[in-house]
Amino acid sequence: MHSPVNLRSSARNQAGVTLLEVMISVLIMAVGMLGIAAMQTTSLRNTQSSMERSQAVIQSYSIIDAMRVNRVQARAGRYNTSGMACAVPEDDGSQSAADRHAWMTSLKNSMGNGAAGDTTTCGNINCTAAGVCTVIVQWDDQRGRDISGSASETQQVRTVVLL
């Protein structure tokens, strides 16, 4: 026959949770919380990068709309920049110069730091006589880069339209 099991001694031996079990549970929770924090950080970084890319597209369309209004001057090359322009151009009184000045000022304020010496937020406009215009917006996407990256991450959005 079987001998009866002493249930009282078994219950007394397993009355509580051991310190080791608690420490393992805390460790698992800590690793989980660190994972959640890392995902949140990545999400914020990618959201900022996405917002800057959207701003670049909006700024490209802004100058393209201005060139559509002043199509003759755009086809004549009055909106063209000589390479990547990082400085806000002077307004000489013409509509094209006023549009370029307003565009670059808006570009610097919305994407750059707005400082006069900002050399990371730049724009390039090149229109041909046939009306094919290329607008390039460049900026420093330092928040969107990999965590291990040490250099700035320059991004460009290129828009080509036919006026």
Image (cartoon, helix red, strand yellow):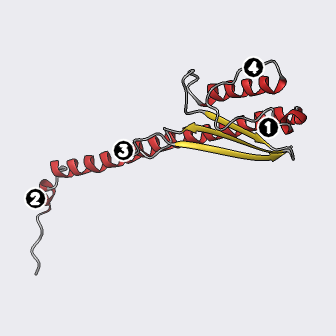
Residue type indicated by callout 1: Ile
* Residue assigned mark 4: 91
In the rendered view, does 99 fall on the left or right side of 148? right
Label 2 close to label 3 by CB (< 8 Å): no
In the rendered view, does 29 fall on the left or right side of 1? right
Residue under the point 82% across and 32% down: 66
Query: Upstream in the sequence, badge 1 or badge 3?
Result: 3
* Residue assigned mark 2: 9
CA gap, disc 1 and disc 3:
47 Å
**134 relative to 1, above or below:** above
* Residue assigned mark 3: 33
Q: SS at mark 4?
A: loop
Q: Nearer the viewer, mark 2 or mark 3?
A: 3
Q: SS at mark 3?
A: helix
Rendering coords of residue 71 (x, y %): 88, 36
Q: SS at mark 1?
A: helix
Q: Nearer the viewer, mark 4 or mark 3?
A: 4
Residue type indicated by callout 4: Asp
Residue under the point 77% across and 34% down: 63
Q: SS at mark 2?
A: helix
Label 3: how many Cα within 10 Å (few below 14, some 14–19, many 20+) = few
* Residue assigned mark 1: 64
